[in-house]
Amino acid sequence: MTTVNALNLAEVGSLIGDQARAQMLTALLDGRALTAGELAWCAGITPQTASGHLAKLQTAGLLAMEKQGRHRYFRLSSPTVAGMLESMQVVCAVDTPKRIRPESRMDADLRQARTCYDHLAGVLGVALADALAERAVIDFSGDGGLVTSAGRDFLDGFGLDMAKLEKGKRHFCRPCLDWSERRHHIAGAVGAGLADRLFDLKWIERIKDSRAVRVTPAGRKGLQATFGIDHSA
Amino acid sequence: MTTVNALNLAEVGSLIGDQARAQMLTALLDGRALTAGELAWCAGITPQTASGHLAKLQTAGLLAMEKQGRHRYFRLSSPTVAGMLESMQVVCAVDTPKRIRPESRMDADLRQARTCYDHLAGVLGVALADALAERAVIDFSGDGGLVTSAGRDFLDGFGLDMAKLEKGKRHFCRPCLDWSERRHHIAGAVGAGLADRLFDLKWIERIKDSRAVRVTPAGRKGLQATFGIDHSA
DNA sequence: CCGATACTTCGGCACCGACCGAAGCATGCC
DNA sequence: GGCATGCTTCGGTCGGTGCCGAAGTATCGG
């Protein structure tokens, strides 16, 4: 399904040996995931052409893909691939490492904190995921997400009804790719429960007519105390 | 002259992204130098096609070339290039590391010891170069070859007329790529002087109708005592 | 010198693959 | 439901390039 890996040197070479594909790969070199459209823009080609390139790179196993609603996020499939590309860059006599900026100007509020369906995303969402991972409450290192047994107690103590959340049919704790931060935040029942609890505590509140949320003064204090998150904006 | 290095990722990729070129590069991955003809054979293409490929790889700076009479020896231009190729092989899921054997069966005598124009080559020639380098008589680490001042005394003591050799117009001491050993032996005035002296001492003698030379019993003893060379064949 | 060998340059063919326009799904938003 | 958006599939064009035959240059060997 994912990779058909039976490549030889020449096949890998010619995959990279196309101007458009090389630009896409370069744009992905920092480890972020980008959408097909953004990658098309990076490479200066139309979406339909980019789609073909991305399909090739994916079936060859150089890229991994993650669906996100109507978006498709692509990233390098492994650090091995990144290492290869970097060693090729070295040979290229590394002239100008100009960084490509595929993101258009977007709403600052949305970037800071917003809901993603029923859970939190944006800078805040990612910070929350990082904090919980650091505190060994959740574990995103595997394929899906796990809540540790100590983490279950912690979340229960924070006011989430873990017993109830565990009963539901939906994914319990799932990493979800953040479109502005390009890193994972917490989705699934746990993610939704966390967001609900923060609204209940009035640590965050919705900004009218927007998916964006604002951190309240109380929230700033609470997030710092509970999770060590310093949310300035 | 040598390299025009203004490459980008895609250019490097497409250089490697050709079946024939990839096979040539793979054959060179162990660091040996191979002739254009051998590389053509490795890649399964005609010499004229290979010539074009090799020219591209050379101007791109991936390969270095060394002329040797009517032969042209190509090798990877640097360990950096070898490293890049290896990291690409890793991504290829390293299926079969079958080694290519470009050398045809050749005369064992010639491989052991022979004259290369007016100096010595083959296993013996390379061993002599190694021994003199180890004893700090010559220095092949730079671009050309150097005879150290201590080395000058050593060679003079061994019976070479160094004052006379130094007068000549020709290259004094030059590394010369050995076609059977794929390593350098000593050419130039010093190489010729050494060969002459060994013939004079009757440590080596020509094999009739051949460029091959034979090490005499006296030579075996002398080479061992003077240079630490154990020439068994 | 002359033939043999190693390699290159030139010219023409043929094929692969990158590209885009148009049309077709899938998803999100109102 | 209806419209917009993100992405994919399909079909046809066209430029780039790998390939070899033939002919040319350099070097060795006798």
Image (cartoon, coloured by chain):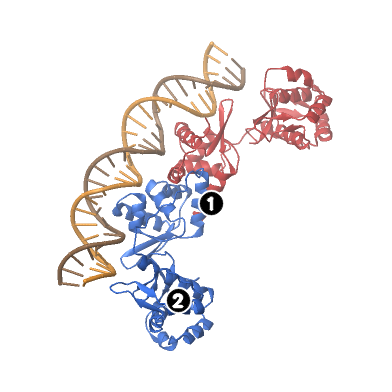
Chain colours: A blue, B red, C orange, D brown
To which chain does the residue with label 2 belong?
A
What SS does tag 2 mark? helix
Residue B15 pos. (x, y %): 45, 42
- Chain bearing mark 1: B
Point out residue B95 in the picture as x, y percentages from the top left corner.
51, 55
Work out whether residue B197 or residue B211 is closer to the camera in this orientation and state it.
Answer: B197
Q: Residue at x 69, y 31 (%)?
A: B185
Give the quadrant of the N terminus of chain A: bottom left
Please tell me whether residue A44 is drawn above or below residue B186 in the rendered image.
below
Q: Is residue B209 left or right of residue B72?
A: right
Q: Is residue A177 above or below residue A57?
A: below
Structural distance between the alpha carbons of marks 2 and 1 = 47 Å
Amino acid type for the residue under numbered disc 2? Arg
User: Is residue B223 among the parts visible in the rendering?
Assistant: yes
Q: Position of residue A153 (x, y in %)?
A: 51, 85
Lateral position of residue A75 relative to residue A93, left or right = left
**Circle 2 or circle 1, nearest the eye:** 2
User: Mark 1 sits on what residue?
Assistant: B87
Disc marking residue A101: none
Residue contact at pointers 2 and 1, CB within 8 angstroms? no
- Residue at numbered disc 2: A220
Q: Residues within 10 Å of mark 2 (few under 14, many from 20)?
A: some
Q: Secondary structure at mark 1?
A: helix
Camera sees residue B233? no
Density class for disc 1 (Cα within 10 Å; few <14, some 14-19, many ≥20) is some
What amino acid is found at the position of numbered circle 1 in the picture?
Ser
